[in-house]
Structure formats: structure tokens, C-alpha cells
Amino acid sequence: MRNIQTVALIGLGAIGCSIARELQRAVGADNFRVIAGGARGDRIQNQGVWINGEHCRFAVTPPAARTSPADLVIVAVKYPALPQAIRDIANQVGPDTMILSLLNGVTSEREIAAVYGWEHMLYGLVRRSVVMQGNVCTFDAWGTYYFGEKTNQTRSERVQAMCRLFDKAGIHWEVPQDVVREQWFKFLGNIGENQTSAILGIPYGAWHTDGNDANWVREAACREVIAVAQKLGIDLGEADLARQRAVIKSVPAQGKTSMLQDIEAGRPTEVDMFAGALCRMGRECGVPTPVNELLYHMIRVLEQKNRDAL
């Protein structure tokens, strides 16, 4: 029976912090590594992070350090940091290492697999509202972590090992039969919610009333995701818009999307992974995406404004 004894995490931001404490408790402090170098690594090592009011410290491993490979590498960086993260996990990946990407979007697995091979990859996604301000992370009990092989009619040995680890950590998980479709369903939500909230400055509660102006804008962006997905053979449709309305209403009204938090904090956004990727796929398969073209450039302007580049 395969077991996960060592875990390496790269990306101690909102999503990373939301599972780091629990995973460290599950495998033990000596078997849990945060991969970080330079000033960021020093800051994590010296200051730690606050997770729901608890001061937490983690062992920091610089990317260049020679260690035994981890059984599981979790990639939880923001999309702009993914190319560097792919390089930084090199010393953590051995012949039997599993790599789980918890990034938003539908392209990160492909980018990681291009370097390390598909035989290492598990598909993953997260549905959780997390607020990160500096080194302070807060969240409520709402949230689920999804993972699996590309298809999961039966659970592979690797997936079963993940289930046991997350059970031991007390982390709520699901294994979708079609995890790629589930990623695209979340992509639909990210396209509609992250981007429009970043531009309009609105929390989740703005979408809690069906049929209002905020939902009109959100769903106009989502329908372009459906059109591209259908062209690519992924079964998304209007029923998924209805499903997403219910998902939004389960998120606390005061919660903010990660992209809105990025804009407010003056950080680069993941717009290349959302509208940027969708528009590229749309051009490749001949599906127009004018709403997302507009959203892309509007968010780029907000980023330029934050950099005083206008």
C-alpha cells in the first residue's frame, strides 16, 4: 500500500496556508517542507505565518538544497510565479514523486508535465474562500480540495494515498469522476467572478441576488467559457451556469475573490491564466471571446495603474 510520508509545498500564499498547518500535523514537522529561497525564504523561516489566529512555523528548504525527493509536491503559487516554481521544485521530484497543482485555470498541469512528465501529475483544484494579508491568513470552514487522475471511475493507488493523507490531515476532499470537466467548471467561475470583481471592486455578496446587473456581467464572461469548452469537447452548458449560481451563494457575502485581493494589494494578477488563456484557446479553435478580450485589457490597465505605469 502506497503512503505519503514527505510533503513539499511551494507557494505559502492563501491556498498554501489553507492546508499547510494541517498537512504538517499529518506527516510531522520533519517531513513537511516549504520550498522558498532568498528573502522570502528568510521571512517565512524567521516570521512564520498566522493562520486563523495561530502562529505557525514551517521548515524552509531553499530550491538549491539537496534533499531526498518528496513523496508529494504541492504547487500552490500564483500563475505569474509558475515558471520559477517549476524550476524550484527540481530537487524535490524523484521517480515516484506525485505532483499536485492547486493553481486556478486549466493549463498548469500541462506546463508542469512538460518538464517532469505526465506520469508525475495529479489533477487538482480548490474551492475555498481565503483572505491573505501580508503573513496573515484567514478562512472559515467552507471549502473542498479536489484531486484525481484524469478519469477516476476507479481510484488509483496514488489517489487512494492522497485520500488517506487528506483524511489524516482533516482536510475535506473529493475525487471527481471527470476532474478535467470539474476544472473547467471552476474555470468558468474564475473567469466570471475573479475578473469582474477585480474590475468592479465587489465581494461575493454582489452575486447573491439572481438576475441583477452584477450577475449579467459575470455570466456574459462565463458563456464564452462554455462556447470554447464545447468546441474542445468538454461538456459544459447552461446547467453549469445554474450550478455556479448555487456555488456563489454558499460563499460568505463579505468574501473577496483572489484577483480582487491582488488588485487591492497592488500585486500582479492571474489574468493571463483566465482571460488570456481563454482568448488564446478561442483563437485556436475559432470561437470569438470579445467579453474576455475586454476584461483582459481592463485588468491590465488596473495592473498598470497599480505600478504607476500610466
Image (tube, rainbow, N blue to C red):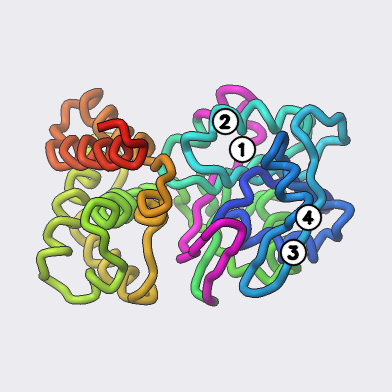
- Mark 2 or 3: the one toward you: 3
Q: Which residue is mark 1?
A: 121
Crowding at label 1, few (<14), some or many (≥20) Cα neighbours within 10 Å? many
The secondary structure type at the circle numbered 1 is strand
**Marks 2 and 1 close (CB-CB < 8 Å):** yes
Q: Is residue 289 left or right of residue 254?
A: left
Q: Is residue 101 left or right of residue 40?
A: left
Residue under the point 56% across and 23% down: 114
Nearer-the-camera pick, 305 or 295: 305
Tell me the distance, in whole angstroms, between the alpha carbons under discs 2 and 4.
25 Å
Q: Amino acid at mark 2?
A: Ile
Dot 2 or dot 1, earlier in sequence: 2
- Mark 2 or 4: the one toward you: 4
Spot occupied by residue 133 in the image (x, y as percentages of width and height)? 52, 60
The secondary structure type at the circle numbered 2 is helix
Q: Which residue is mark 2?
A: 112
The part of the chain drawn in magenta is 111-140
Nearer-the-camera pick, 178 or 8: 8
**Marks 2 and 4 close (CB-CB < 8 Å):** no
What mark, if any, has residue 58 been given in the picture? Answer: 4
Nearer-the-camera pick, 154 or 232: 232
Spot occupied by residue 115 in the image (x, y as percentages of width and height)? 61, 23
**Rendered image quadrant of residue 261:** bottom left
Q: Does the image show residue 282?
A: yes
Spot occupied by residue 273 in the image (x, y as percentages of width and height)? 38, 37
Tell me the distance, in whole angstroms, between the alpha carbons under discs 2 and 3.
29 Å
Tell me the distance, in whole angstroms, between the alpha carbons under discs 2 and 1.
8 Å
Number of numbered tags placed on the structure image: 4
Residue under the point 11% across and 70% down: 211
Q: Which residue is mark 3?
A: 56
Q: Amino acid at mark 4?
A: Phe
